[in-house]
Structure formats: structure tokens, C-alpha cells
Image (spheres, rainbow, N blue to C red):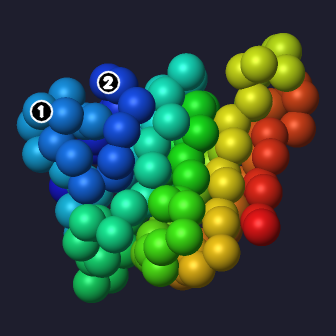
């Protein structure tokens, strides 16, 4: 399985978000880079088993006003740095579902944020 790292902000389902090399699929891992916002959008293909252990250094958010699902078959690490501006953020809005067969771990000097609206 592969690991995909964001190279810019954008939709999870857009290849350009991941450097043009495709999008994460079943069993793949993903990393959201500091300074990037990746949106779990309605175009995402929900994997059968889920994504592998993945890291959020930037912002991973669900699309506003849409029913979206992120299925994990591993851990999702929301990582923080040394300043408020470097906090990792997992932001789930109305209509979002996150299915985790594992754990959410918040790690860092400053506490990363899990925000559910």
C-alpha cells in the first residue's frame, strides 16, 4: 500500500491535492501537511476496509453541508507543533461520518484539536 502526502490544499478526492499521483485508496495512508487544508468531499470513494494509519499536521475537514464519510482501518494522528498556528485540526461538520477501526490520537506540545459541529 502507498502513502500519499498533500502538496497543496484541496479536496480529498482530487489528485492535485496529493501531487497529481492519484488519491489515497483502500489500505493506503495519507498525511495532511502543515499549512494545508484537505476537505473530505462528496467525491471521495469510501474504501471497503479503510485507510491505514494517517497523520494530520494541517487541517482535515469535512465538506460543509454535505454527507461525507472517512473510513479508517488504522489510527488517525492529529499532530501539534510548538505554536498555536501549527496545531493539527480534524474538523467534522454536520452530515460528516468518521468510521475508525483504531484510535484518534492527539499528540504535540500544544494539544491538537478535534472539532465536531
Of residue 47 and residue 62, the one placed in the foreground of this image is: 62
Percent of width and height locating residue 3: 28, 43
Q: Is residue 57 above or below residue 90?
A: above
Q: Residue at x 32, y 24 (%)?
A: 7
Tell me the residue that label 1 is attached to: 20
Label 2: how many residues lie within 10 Å, few (<14), some (14-19) or many (20+)? Answer: some
Q: Helix, strand, or loop for circle 2?
A: loop
Percent of width and height locating residue 57: 59, 32
Q: Is residue 81 above or below residue 104?
A: above
| Mark before the other along the chain sequence, 2 or 1 | 2
Tell me the residue that label 2 is attached to: 7
Residue 115 seen in this snapshot:
yes
105 left or right of 82? Answer: left
Q: Residue at x 19, y 28 (%)?
A: 19
Q: Helix, strand, or loop for circle 1?
A: loop
Which corner quadrant holds the C terminus?
bottom right
Q: Which mark is residue 87?
A: none
Label 1: how many residues lie within 10 Å, few (<14), some (14-19) or many (20+)? Answer: few
Q: Residue at x 45, y 43 (%)?
A: 38
- Rendering quarter of residue 109: top right
Amino acid at each position: 500500500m502507498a502513502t500519499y502526502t498533500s502538496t497543496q490544499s484541496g479536496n480529498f478526492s482530487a489528485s492535485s491535492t496529493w501531487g497529481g499521483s492519484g488519491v489515497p485508496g483502500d489500505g493506503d495512508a495519507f498525511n495532511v501537511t502543515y499549512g494545508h487544508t484537505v476537505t473530505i468531499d462528496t467525491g471521495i470513494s469510501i474504501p471497503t476496509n479503510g485507510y491505514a494509519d494517517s497523520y494530520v499536521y494541517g487541517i482535515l475537514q469535512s465538506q460543509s453541508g454535505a454527507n461525507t464519510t472517512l473510513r479508517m482501518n488504522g489510527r488517525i494522528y492529529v499532530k501539534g507543533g510548538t505554536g498555536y498556528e501549527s496545531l493539527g485540526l480534524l474538523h467534522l461538520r454536520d452530515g460528516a461520518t468518521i468510521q475508525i477501526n483504531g484510535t484518534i490520537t492527539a499528540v504535540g506540545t500544544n494539544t491538537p484539536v478535534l472539532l465536531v459541529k
